[in-house]
Image (cartoon, helix red, strand yellow):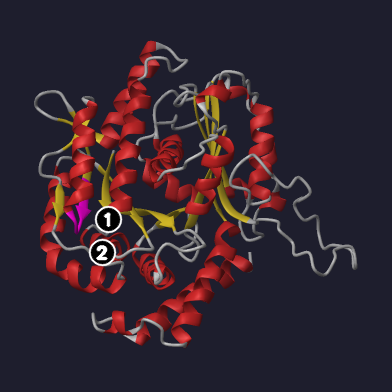
């Protein structure tokens, strides 16, 4: 089954390019540590999901590119064409001459209705090329105007027009220090709208990805390009094909459906995160060897302690074993244990069948209202991913975002209470009631995750 990707705004288009490039590079590699037949099946499965073959045999990404300024789309199209390996379809993009000025209301209330028909027609044409549609993967930022405002509008339309297809939004969480003065407003409006129209929100925090580039990839001058490649690697490690069942050598047919089934058991809880191990520069990789036991021990502790990478994990944090004895925990030390609703571990590479995942089946990791048998799943393939002989990805629905979400809602509320910049939104039809509704919905999300 195929996935149609919708790339929105500068951020969405730049990341989208890196994702397709990573998917193509990985599937095109003949060194997958598996048999030729298995590699061919893997390549065919990847192609069906993400690419369509044009008449001349060139692969075209199953994607729509949308931005309100032409510059980034033109750059993205030419980068793909210059790669000489894959490209974007000629009529798969929509752009205008005027951006959204980092104003969510302008993207949602002006650009959205004005260009709705053109954008939805492009999406329909792409859907018609698919033999079978798994769903939509929508890549967007939530701090600016086009990706966030127009992204929320398009997702809402997809829900209405393709009600039986799944929608997963990949959203980029802004730097805590801020890139845009109104980013907290844009963020709460984006999140509250997506919570109503999307099936799952896959969140990447800029601060965390920046740290991975600095500490694990040893990059000195970090660019958005570097960060986007880390993101693309993480997404590829989740979306590339895996076997459909233990002992089976058939690849999974419906990746989005299987992800949702494994990770989103209740519509109140739809925030997902990705963690990867190992992640390192080419230079370091030449001197490194890995065991499944070592990788999974680190990955489990990353989950428990809510660490985004294997460096700097807090090994003191343990799953709760009943109620703590009175007075054992200092009053000023909050419990940092990260409770999960559901986890999916994806293993790729050599000796994958020998990996022991017992540590992820511990009931103490999960909320009490879900049986660990239903809360934990594993996908595997012997086919290695990218340059790693063994690699593991963890997609998790847990409390990982509670602190960041609470912070962003708090900052937005402080601005809203003093009516700062509200006029920029009301003049495009977003009323104070819309803000209040967003605050109420997101405070409920925070409370629900806190109570796991």
Residue at left 36%, top 69%? 193
**Viewer-nearest of labels 2 and 1?**
1
Tell me the quadrant of the picture where the N terminus can be found.
top left
Task: State the separation of the CA atoms marked 2 and 1.
Answer: 8 Å
Q: Position of residue 266 (x, y in %)?
A: 49, 61
Seen in the picture, residue 42 relative to 310 is either above or below; the reply is: above
Pick the front one: 352 or 247: 352
Q: Position of residue 438 (x, y in %)?
A: 42, 77
Q: Which mark is residue 9?
A: 1
Seen in the picture, residue 380 relative to 444 is either above or below; the reply is: above
Residue at left 51%, top 38%? 220
Residue at left 40%, top 42%? 228
**Residue lying furthest front:** 221
| Disc 2 and disc 1 in contact, CB within 8 angstroms | yes
**Magenta stretch bounds:** 64-69
Pick the front one: 231 or 239: 231
Residue at left 71%, top 58%? 336
Q: Residues within 10 Å of mark 1 (few under 14, many from 20)?
A: many
Tell me the quadrant of the picture where the C terminus can be found.
bottom right
Q: Is residue 293 left or right of residue 393?
A: right
Pick the front one: 43 or 433: 433
Q: Is residue 115 magenta?
A: no
Magenta stretch mostly in which secondary structure? strand
Q: Is residue 440 visible?
A: no
| Residue ID for mark 2 | 150
């Amino acid at each position: 089954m195929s996935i149609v990707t919708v790339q929105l705004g500068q951020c969405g288009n730049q990341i989208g390019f890196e994702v397709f490039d990573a998917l193509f590079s990985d599937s095109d590699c003949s060194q997958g540590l598996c048999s030729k037949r298995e590699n061919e099946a893997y390549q065919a499965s990847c192609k069906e999901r993400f690419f369509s073959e044009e008449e001349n045999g060139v692969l075209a990404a199953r994607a729509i590119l949308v931005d309100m300024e032409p510059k980034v789309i033109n750059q993205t199209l030419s980068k793909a064409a210059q790669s000489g390996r894959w490209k974007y379809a000629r009529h798969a993009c929509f752009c205008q001459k005027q951006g959204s000025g980092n104003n969510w209301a302008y993207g949602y209330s002006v650009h959205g209705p004005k260009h709705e028909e053109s954008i939805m027609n492009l999406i329909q044409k792409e859907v018609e090329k698919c033999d079978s549609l798994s769903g939509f993967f929508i890549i967007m930022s939530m701090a600016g105007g086009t990706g966030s405002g127009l992204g929320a509008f398009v997702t809402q339309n997809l829900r209405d027009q393709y009600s039986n297809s799944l929608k997963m939004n990949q959203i980029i969480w802004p730097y805590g220090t801020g890139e845009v003065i109104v980013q907290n407003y844009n963020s709460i409006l984006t999140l509250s709208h997506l919570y109503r129209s999307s099936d799952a929100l896959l969140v990447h925090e800029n601060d965390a990805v920046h740290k991975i580039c600095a500490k694990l990839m040893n990059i000195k001058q970090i660019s958005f390009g570097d960060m986007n490649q880390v993101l693309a690697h993480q997404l590829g490690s989740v979306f590339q094909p895996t076997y459909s069942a233990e002992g089976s050598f058939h690849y999974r047919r419906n990746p989005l459906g299987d992800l949702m089934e494994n990770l989103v058991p209740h519509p109140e809880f739809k925030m997902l995160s990705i963690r990867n191990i190992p992640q390192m520069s080419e230079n370091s990789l030449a001197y490194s060897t890995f065991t499944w036991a070592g990788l999974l021990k680190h990955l489990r502790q990353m989950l428990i302690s809510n660490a985004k990478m294997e460096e700097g994990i807090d090994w003191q944090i343990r799953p709760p074993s009943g109620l703590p004895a009175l007075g054992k925990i200092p009053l000023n030390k909050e419990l940092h244990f990260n409770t999960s609703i559901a986890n999916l571990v994806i293993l790729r590479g050599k000796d994958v069948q020998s990996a022991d995942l017992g540590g992820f089946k511990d009931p103490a990791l999960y909320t009490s209202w879900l049986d660990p048998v239903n809360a934990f799943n594993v996908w595997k393939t012997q086919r290695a991913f990218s340059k790693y002989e063994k690699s593991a990805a963890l997609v998790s629905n847990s409390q990982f975002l509670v602190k960041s979400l609470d912070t962003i809602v708090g900052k937005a509320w402080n601005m809203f209470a003093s009516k700062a910049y509200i006029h920029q939104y009301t003049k495009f039809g977003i009323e104070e009631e819309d803000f209040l509704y967003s605050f109420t919905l997101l405070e409920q999300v925070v409370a629900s995750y806190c109570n796991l």
